Amino acid sequence: MNTTLNFQPTKFITSAANIRQLPDDAGVEIAFAGRSNAGKSSALNTITRQKALARTSKTPGRTQLINVFEVTEGKRLIDLPGYGYAKVPLAVKEKWNLALSEYLQKRQSLRGLVLLMDIRHPYRDTDQDLLHWATDCGIPVLVLLTKADKLKPSQRKSTLLQAREAALVFGDGVQVEMFSSHNKLGLPQVEVILSNWLNTPADATVNADAAE
């Protein structure tokens, strides 16, 4: 039985423009992805119980590099560039998308993808594209419906059920949970899922199909 990890010691390691600048492809890691306004940095800060581990900004799209955080030796969290919203030049967006797709396709230490979506606007086209791609490659996905505190409890429950039903089309490798950085709703469930992934043996080939 896997034990829940302590994420508080997590520390920033490096930023990279592409996978060639990342640490050695060894150990295990989990990637965080989502639209630029999905609350990705806030979620990382909440999970690690740190106020400023991941930079947050009122201007979506601030994360333009792949940011690497180490939970403990050989276990990492990867903050991928946000997509879909940021008011940046097209060439920059294309560069981000290339870095993101290259990472997901070639990184052998990847054990799972956390895909963050605003609970009020789930399953945008770009979210669905990423879900299709990840599940086609055999990468487990946790869909995290962020900003859940923005909805009333009855709305949250209804939206969660609808989101879980919508996830069925992507196969059994997709889990859906609610999350709020504001009141920590869903944090225990997220910690358990992330711990299970990070405790996966380093020699497991989660996304071997993508490397063929």
Image (cartoon, rainbow, N blue to C red):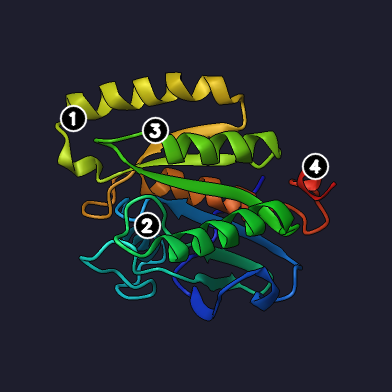
The residue to which callout 2 is attached is 40
Residue 60 horizontal/vertical position (percent):
28, 61
List x then y, in percent, for residue 120: 24, 35
Residue at 27%, 54% in the rendered image: 181
Residue type at tag 4: Asp
| Comes first in the chain, label 1 or label 4 | 1
Distance in Å between CA atoms under marks 2 and 1: 22 Å
Amino acid on which the number 1 mark rests in the picture? Pro
The N terminus - image quarter:
top right
Q: Which residue is mark 3?
A: 123
Residue 27 lies, in percent from the top left, at: 73, 66
- Residue 87 visible somewhere in the drawing: yes
Q: Check disc 3 and give the amino acid type.
A: Tyr
Q: Which residue is at the front of the view, 19 or 157?
A: 19
Cα distance, mark 3 to mark 2?
16 Å
Distance in Å between CA atoms under marks 4 and 3: 25 Å
**Residue labelled with disc 1:** 153
Of labels 2 and 1, earlier in sequence is 2
> Which picture quadrant has residue 150?
top left
* Amino acid at dot 2: Lys
Q: For label 2, count other residues whose C-alpha is less than 10 Å away and answer few (under 14), some (14-19) or many (20+).
A: many
Sequence-wise first label, 4 or 3:
3
Label 4 environment density (alpha carbons within 10 Å; few <14, some 14–19, many ≥20): few
Report the Cα–Cα distance between label 1 and label 3.
20 Å
Q: Is residue 82 left or right of residue 77?
A: left
